Amino acid sequence: GQNIDQPTEMTATEGAIVQINCTYQTSGFNGLFWYQQHAGEAPTFLSYNVLDGLEEKGRFSSFLSRSKGYSYLLLKELQMKDSASYLCAVRDSGGYQKVTFGTGTKLQVIP
Amino acid sequence: DVKVTQSSRYLVKRTGEKVFLECVQDMDHENMFWYRQDPGLGLRLIYFSYDVKMKEKGDIPEGYSVSREKKERFSLILESASTNQTSMYLCASSWTLAGGPYEQYFGPGTRLTVT
């Protein structure tokens, strides 16, 4: 099975940088996802890591260390619209594409 | 654009009723998923399907069943609704080809209240 830990809540200032951490313990690993979920809406895909290192996509970057069971999502130049929950999710190494989600980190961006 | 639709945004049912939640995707995805989302517990997988008529239990299948008779449609059935099944239900779909991220695309969710 999978066990995924993320902080419950974070607050950051508009224009700043924030790092949201995710640690996981897994019986198998075939990739880690980050999703964004605004209140009352469905999650939407942000990033994917399967190899160690940093993946950059505009203002958002995601890092993975498989040996440490650790990932982070880095958001730069924070905007008010970035206020949302950020979900870390790990995919099993089995054949069925099963993904386990963490409980999410609620980020509040303040002026 | 991938589109995943769910039959209702809000649903109110009585204890003991049989409840059907429908999900349809338009991108020919092999995989489809049903989750429930509760405060403090996050997204929990109920069932998933990797092909027509195929299904696998997720982490919390008790009290639920599913049906996938066509590739684009995945139904979640609550055989006898109970108050502890009051929740937000989210459907998702994805491809299953090797070598890619194949992220999940989510529907808008159904807020089910069982009274």
Image (cartoon, rainbow, N blue to C red):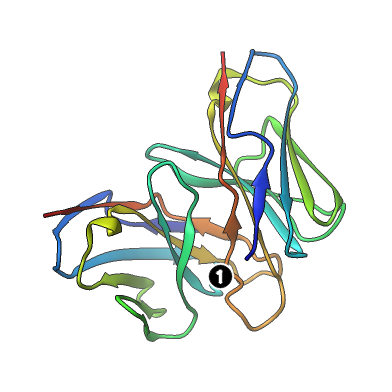
Question: Image quadrant for the C terminus of chain B?
Answer: top right
Query: Residue at (34%, 79%) from the top-left corner?
Result: A58
Q: The residue tagged with tag 1: helix, strand or loop?
A: loop
> Horizontal and vertical percent for residue A100?
52, 57
Which amino acid, mark 1? Gly
Residue A94, image x and y in percent? 66, 69
Residue marked by disc 1: A28
Is B65 placed above or below A61 here? above
Splitting the image into 4 quarters, where does residue B15 fall? Answer: top right
Q: How many marks?
A: 1
Tell me residue B93's x, y (percent): 66, 58
Q: Nearer the viewer, residue A50 or B31?
A: B31
Image-quadrant location for residue A99: bottom right
| Front-most of residues B104 and B6 | B6
B28 and A19: which one is in front? Answer: B28
Question: From the viewer's perspective, is residue A65 above or below residue B76?
Answer: below
Chain holding disc 1: A
> Residue at coordinates 37% horizontally, 52% vertically from top-left?
A104
In the image, is B30 to the left or to the right of B6?
A: right
